[in-house]
Amino acid sequence: MVRRWSSRWRSMEILVVRGGSVGGSDLGHLCLRFHSALISATKPEDLFVAGIDTTSSTVEWAMAELLRNPNKLAKAKEELCEVVGEDAPLEESHISKLPYLQAVVKETFRLHPPAPFLLPHKCDEVVNISGFQVPKDAQVFVNVWAMGRDPTIWENPNMFEPERFLKCEINFKGNNFELIPFGAGKRICPGLPLAHRSVHLMVAFLLHNFEWKLADGLTPENMNMVEHFGLTLKKMQPLRVQAISVKDN
Ligand code: HEM
């Protein structure tokens, strides 16, 4: 087991989202106070398991979505060229100056959250949500996958449109309940700052240093984007691509 049920109990905010519109104040989000049963990562190796699969599958989904949408890929590359320069090395300080790249990462988390139900929590007391009574001790899952594709929250929810994040201030740091791939509140993923840096840097590095082509005769139209839910939400069919270094030319 990656994480174990802990005997301790702590309180946190669990967010159950239904309805509403992006950026609006009346999102119809219910912010419920639960006391969550803890699943604790107590061993150092747990941190690796928690961090590696989630990060790598996010990078794979981001690249898959960009290859399926060549114009978005071109836009991200163009931004990198302008901000970093064609031959200059990418540095961490560039990330904050790359709004389109940041939007690509947000859009990837919206459509493909690596932990689609977050981690299980447990209700510490009876709670009423919109007329539904959640009994004490009920196990609570937050379906962030469904929230990311809810048409009452997002326009064209099934389309990969990073541009939607250029028009709003939504981030995934636990303040905007439409987008909480890392959870929110006290039990928010402690690896968020590291994951934030790693995912942006990896995607930026891959785009900045290589030209990308789909392998095996695939075209953007016939790519298989089916998801497989194991430890994390991965691509059922691993992305197969051809990377051509632009630095050697
Ligand atoms: C794309 C990257 C990542 C995503 C999407 C992600 C997502 C999550 C989520 C949804 C949770 C559960 C939050 C909840 O209980 O509601 C979690 C917990 C956790 N994550 Fe991450 N994570 C990522 C990367 C990392 C990294 C890089 C590390 C460490 C190096 C890490 C360490 C942990 C640990 C230790 C927990 C359990 C915390 C606890 O028991 O309270 N994660 N993560």
Image (cartoon, rainbow, N blue to C red):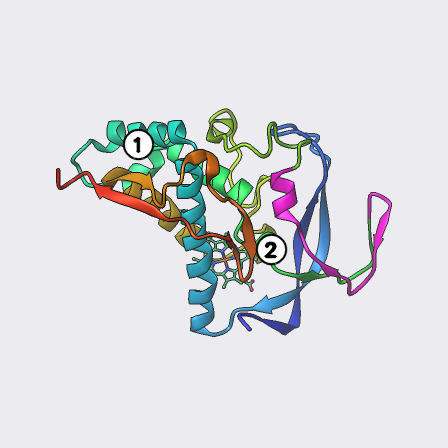
Tell me the quarter of the picture where residue 146 sits.
top right
The amino acid sitting under disc 2 is: Leu
Q: Residue at x 61, y 31 (%)?
A: 154
- Checking the image for residue 77, the label placed there is 1
Magenta stretch: give its range: 129-149
**Residue 102 visible at all:** no
Residue 205 placed where, x, y %?
28, 43
Residue 182 placed where, x, y %?
54, 51
Q: Is residue 74 left or right of residue 88?
A: right
Pointer 1 residue Cβ closer than 8 Å to ligand 1 = no
Q: Residues within 10 Å of mark 2 (few under 14, many from 20)?
A: many
Sequence-wise, the earlier of marks 2 and 1 is 1
Residue named by callout 2: 118
Dot 2 falls on a residue whose secondary structure is loop
143 inside magenta stretch? yes
Residue 94 placed where, x, y %?
29, 37
How many discs mark residues in the rendered view? 2
Rendered view: 108 above or below 135: above
Pointer 2 residue Cβ closer than 8 Å to ligand 1 = yes
How far apart are labels 2 and 1 at the CA level?
A: 32 Å
Rendered view: 6 above or below 148: below
Q: In which quadrant will I find the C terminus?
A: top left
Q: Residue at x 72, y 35 (%)?
A: 19
Q: Among all residues in the image, which is located at the extreme top?
A: 167
